[in-house]
């Protein structure tokens, strides 16, 4: 994983969010955002949305163009922290 990979993933997420009228704020945090992910690092996406419940189910991750960054979603895990919900997204490089 190199910094260019992280930048490409940030761009894919930002491009997706910019087309959604319900997204009020977006942040990427953790090792991907810092540009130093390990192979086991998950992508941490924070969204503030008027329709937050819509992101707890459905295929919104499939709408992000991770393939343009050279990755695909391997798995995702949902976690609830009271008023806050998160999706921990595991990515893997696309086969060459």
Image: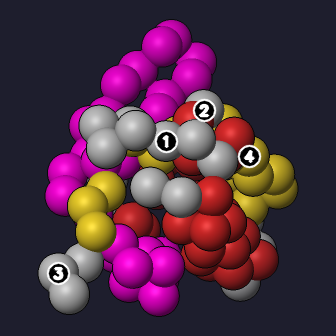
Q: Residue at x 76, y 77 (%)?
A: 18
Mark 3: which secondary structure? loop
Looking at the rendered image, the disc whose residue lies closer to the viewer, 4 or 2, is: 2
Q: Report the Cα–Cα distance between label 1 and label 4.
A: 16 Å
Q: Residue at x 58, y 41 (%)?
A: 36
Q: Residue 64: x percent and y percent?
A: 47, 76
Q: Which residues are magenta?
A: 62-90
Mark 3 touching mark 1, by CB under 8 A? no
Identify the image quadrant of residue 67: bottom left
Q: Is residue 23 above or below residue 39?
A: below
Residue for badge 4: 27
Residue 95, labelled with which disc? 3
Looking at the rendered image, the disc whose residue lies closer to the viewer, 2 or 1, is: 1
How many neighbours does mark 3 have within 10 angstroms: few (below 14), some (14-19), or many (20 or more)? Answer: few
As drawn, the residue found furthest toward the front would be: 2
Q: Report the Cα–Cα distance between label 4 and label 2.
A: 10 Å
Q: Is 72 left or right of 67, judged from the image as shown?
A: left
Could you tell which of marks 2 and 3 lies nearer the N-terminus?
2
Q: Residue 16: x percent and y percent?
A: 62, 77
Q: Is 78 left or right of 48, judged from the image as shown?
A: left
Q: Report the Cα–Cα distance between label 3 and label 1.
A: 19 Å
Mark 2 touching mark 1, by CB under 8 A? yes
Q: Residue at x 54, y 58 (%)?
A: 2
Residue for badge 1: 37
Image quarter of the N terminus: bottom left
Image quarter of the C terminus: bottom left
């Amino acid at each position: 994983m190199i910094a260019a990979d992280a930048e490409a993933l940030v761009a894919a997420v930002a491009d997706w969010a910019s087309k959604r009228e319900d997204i009020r704020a977006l942040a990427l945090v953790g090792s991907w955002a810092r540009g130093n992910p390990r192979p086991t690092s998950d992508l941490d996406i924070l969204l503030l949305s008027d329709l937050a419940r819509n992101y707890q189910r459905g295929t919104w991750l499939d709408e992000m163009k991770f393939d343009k960054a050279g990755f695909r979603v391997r798995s995702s895990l949902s976690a609830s922290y009271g008023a806050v919900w998160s999706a921990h997204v595991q990515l893997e490089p696309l086969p060459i």
